[in-house]
Image (cartoon, rainbow, N blue to C red):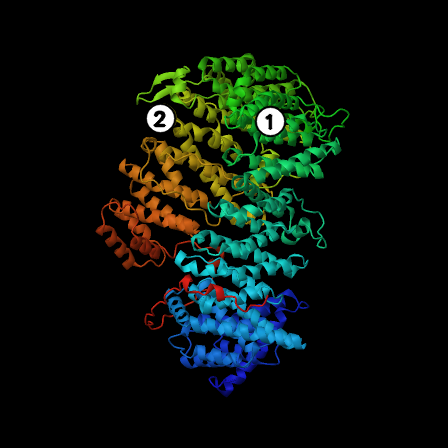
Amino acid sequence: MNIGVMGAEGAGEVGLIADDLSRAVELTLNPSVSQDARNQAYNACESFKENSPWCAQAGLLLASGNQYSAVVKHFGLQLMEHTIKYRWTQITQPEKLFIKENAMKLLYMGGWETAHLNDALARVIVEMIKREWPQQWSTLLAELSDACARGHLHTQIVLHVFLRLVEDVATLQTLEQHQRRKDIHQALTSNMSEIFSFFMRLIELHVQEFKEKTAAGDYVAATSNGRVVQVVLLTLTGFVEWVSTNHVVMNNGRLLQILCILLQDDAFQLPAAECLLQIANRKGSTKERKPLMILFSEDAISCIHRAAVSSINVMNENHYLFLKKLSQVIAGLGQQLVSLWSCATNLESWMPLLLETMLLLTSHPSLTLTQTVNTVWLMFLRHDQISKLPQLVAIIPRWLQASAPKVLKVTYPTSRSTDVNDAITYACIDYDCEQEFAIFFSRCRTEILEGFRHCMVAAPLVTWAHVEQWTRAALAKLDTCPPRVDVTHPLHVEWEALSMVLDVVLSRLLQADPRPNVVEGLQLLQRCVASDPPAPLILSLLLSFISALFVFLSCAYSQIAGAGAGAAGAELLPRVLDKIFAALVYEGPAGLPRDDGDDGRRSRAVKNVRRHAAGLLVKLGTKFPLLLLPVYPRLLEMSRAALARPDLSAVESVTLQEALLLVSNQFCCYERQAALVEQVLGPWTARWAELAPHVGSAAALARLVGLDAPAAPADADDEPARARRTLLHALTLLLGVVKRVCVPADPDKATRGGFSAGVSASGNPVWRNPCSAHVLPLFPGALALCRALHELHAPAAAALRHAAHARALQPPPAERRNLLALRDPPALPPPLPHHRMQNFLYTLHDNVCHLVGAAASTLGRELYAVPELARFLSGSLLYGLEHLPDHWLRPIFRNALKPLLHHCPPAHFEDVALPLHDLVAPFMLMHLSQRWEYITSLYESGKLEEEAGSESQEVLEDILVRHLTREHLEVVKISLVEGPLVAEAAAGDMEEESPAPPARAPDTVSELGAALLHHPRAGPALLHTVLRALMWNDSPSSLRACTLALPALRCALAGGRVGPAEANGALAAALHALRTHGQHDANQAALLALAVQAYETLRPRFPGVAAVLREIPDVDEHDLHRLDEKLAANTAKPSKIDKSKRDLFKKITSKLIGRNVGQLFKKEVSILDLPTMPAVERPRPLEADGVAFERLFAGAPT
């Protein structure tokens, strides 16, 4: 090696240093020495790497010395790489030449047999390329070509150089210096034809040699050739996803031909599939991707099909990995075909083969393969033209046959097995735990069911025939059904899957053309009604069958079905109702022992049947009210008979009455509906009066429900137990009436039915709800109950609770599991006494909140016109907020305040909305600020990191604070900018790494928002809440606050409620938020836009805000001056932010913007720009028409 740059004396010194480093490296990996000794050796190595001027020279000696071990050689290469990465700009030109020449000599020597050492050498060369090529290293490609001629190992190192270079420059773009990345990208592009030709020659040469050496029995040489081919394919994978498609399809698509052929070779099929996957997943314009249609030919699809057939029945890991990769290739091809459908030709030659391949993978026992390929089936079935292809329609029966078993629930095993070719075995291979597999299976089954739904539109007769046959076969198995069946019994597993399939298929019955025979559907429904399963679980699923098949009764009354179907439907409907009501009062099979979880009255399975029947009546009343209207008298008579039974539970009773109310909405008659409401609520008016003294205070409520007494057994029927049932029944019934009774949507019907109550001041009609006169008198009792529940949280009320109920106000187990995103255990144990009390109190409070929210929606102006409504709510729903825990505060905002403020008419802003915010806004500002300080302290102390993923109280509090913050911001959004109500997110969606960007932020606040921001107490509290929410450590909340901050700030500014201190604080909040959330792209973009517009808005009135930017570390005063000049040049309020201002502001705040943990302590790499390269004309894209499709696979082996 050339170490002349050091001199003889220096060389000797470096040799001694190298020996010392060698011993230190060996010591760091020696398990027999003490940890302190290993730490000292490690620190010595790191210190040398950072500080020694002989870093590269010592590294070269370590890498090239035959006496050193592989790990020492690797450390030597790391020393050379470190010198290039971090000291290249400081070392002299002779030292640079020394490093470059000796690195290339290592390459010419052929590297080592150890793959990771060759990869490390490639990284050394790549780091030099990033700093010198092409301007100052014009001979690079010639040198690499010369190295390839020296042997297989040399070739592999060169290929690794190309791969690591394109990763840094194109695919991963870890080279941060834009100009250097642009220069290298341009140089690669200009030489891409030669590079691809080089790759192609290597593949063809070494594949041929691999086959010849294998045939000759020289397996060592064949392995060497095979390794070169694999590395070429790996390198190509880094190129094909970003280079011009001209290079991918050059020479009439020779590369694609080779890749497809290699799919059938066990030695190369996996890297070939990976390379083909990158091509199939290409993004870009239609013009850029159009040449890829070359893959849709008979020869190409035949290769893919043969590869799938040869691997499908082999049970080993390599073939299974290949099948997973191949299914992803097909998914990518499917996406390309759907988007480029107009370019497809000769469908008859290759489409059947493609569909056969997809069906083959769908039939494989692995659900992972099924789910991947199912995405293609869904794309095809959704496509207007593909879904009508004869080839696709013809294969649908076989797809139904293959997919139906995949809907059956698969239970993750307690012990892993890999010797059986079934779904459970592949579940063990692909997923590490039951929860991970359960999440996947739920998504997989949902997507397969979606396929059934679309099949019902594409081929309705075939799909219905399959499902009907399956249903008849399932009903025939009832003869062998035992009286006791659990959820893992094969019959239950099949029926559960079939109930889902029936539901999704028949949900598209009305859109099907041609429509299946209605009479046959009614016959199947009649058979379900006649069935009488002995097991409660199967009976519950039978109700699901009836629910899905009920749509045939709706079709029977249409003119298309004919008179015969109408008569059959009219005869069958009463029998269906009889079946449902029989299930509603189901007692279980005679002689069946009670479950372990029995509370002494009824088993859980029997309860589920009865509740399912009641819920089914509500579903039918919601979806088919007009169908039930003619039989309403019979429905009412049967309901009264059921309600008269003493064994009907509160839940069943209320649900049944809700179904009656839903059907009665079709009367469109105020008097008749009001009379029914009176019948429903009449008996409970007196009970509410009796309960009034007992719900007026915390002490009275505690005595009523037994909080002051020891916990009673579950089957106790003492006075507190009866009081709890009565109280919950009364409140649930009141809520059910408010939710279900409504005014007709048609204004003409509403007017004729007597629902009109005049017009509003703005001329809009005012309607009266039939339940208002009966519900509003009961509201004071419900609100008094809410106040008493809140009083229980006061410190003084702790003495009212017996020691057995000390935890009665904590989150119930179900709510806790929901917040922590934990799945329910397979068999829920019987609830403990204190858990039952937790459920009871939490449910009471939640129902009161739902009651207020539902009343705001259905009662409308009749609720808001109640005198002093805000005072009543402040003294009940909003009483004692300072004592409530977060899990009790959350329903108040989510279920009560959100709809209450959303539906508030402008006439009642002054007397309802403003007083409520006057109370809530200051409290929530203080409460959330304190809670976030506490959560921040937990993070700083490390408690939350230590408990990450656990069920600790600290983790639960963190989740609750985040949810409460988001709920409150939704209320603020509705109030300030008239934002729509949003669906509640899943409890498990806690910390998104990059939240989705919100809808375009409004420019101005609403009428209510202006009134609130001008309010002396609520206005500042709301503005400060929004600004602080920007900084709280919850990225979704910060993103929501971004949409509110600017309009709120502008409104407050216009009202004269922003001073210099508030202006500085607003800009500082945006900058602080950039520090906290800048690592998320969506947050960073929104916060930069907010900061720029806030500065632009505040700077003319408050020149002092510039001082906030001057406090940014290392800020350039010249950049601040340029920013002010840009603002002064455009005084008009822009409709959108000027890009130059945003980029300049980003440059000013670059030191401030937060980075993710992986970037926080990253050592900066400095790469100097080289002289500018001349512009190169871009090659014209190759048109697909210019490719000889018919000759593409000519001569390919079959």
Regarding residue 1167, the answer to whether it shows in the image is no
> Given the current orientation, which residue lies at the most extreme bottom position?
8
Q: Name the spot of residue 902 as percent of width and height, x first.
A: 40, 30
Which residue bears the numbered disc 1? 840
Which residue bears the numbered disc 2? 909
- The relative height of residue 242 versus residue 821 in the rendered view (above or below) is below
Secondary structure type for disc 1: helix
- The relative height of residue 561 versus residue 1169 in the rendered view (above or below) is above
- The kind of residue on which mark 1 rests is Phe
| Label at residue 47 | none
- Mark 2 neighbour class, 10 Å CA radius: few under 14, some 14 to 19, many 20 or more: some
- Residue nearest the viewer, comparing 3 with 932: 3
Q: How many marks?
A: 2
> Given the current orientation, which residue lies at the most extreme right position?
591
> Residue at position x 46%, y 67% from top?
252
Marks 2 & 1, CB-CB < 8 Å contact: no
> Residue at position x 65%, y 42% from top?
409
> Residue at position x 35%, y 44% from top?
1065
Q: Examine the image and state in which quarter residue 520 appears.
A: top right
Mark toward the start of the polypeptide (2 vs 1): 1
Cα separation between marks 2 and 1 = 35 Å
Q: Name the spot of residue 477 as percent of width and height, x first.
A: 72, 35
- The relative height of residue 741 versus residue 399 in the rendered view (above or below) is above
Secondary structure type for disc 2: helix
Q: Name the spot of residue 53 as percent of width and height, x first.
A: 47, 76
Q: Is residue 609 left or right of residue 934?
A: right
- The relative height of residue 659 versus residue 1151 in the rendered view (above or below) is above
Q: Is residue 199 left or right of residue 468?
A: left
- Residue nearest the viewer, comparing 994 with 167: 167
Q: Quadrant of the C terminus?
A: bottom right
- The kind of residue on which mark 2 rests is Phe
- Mark 1 neighbour class, 10 Å CA radius: few under 14, some 14 to 19, many 20 or more: some
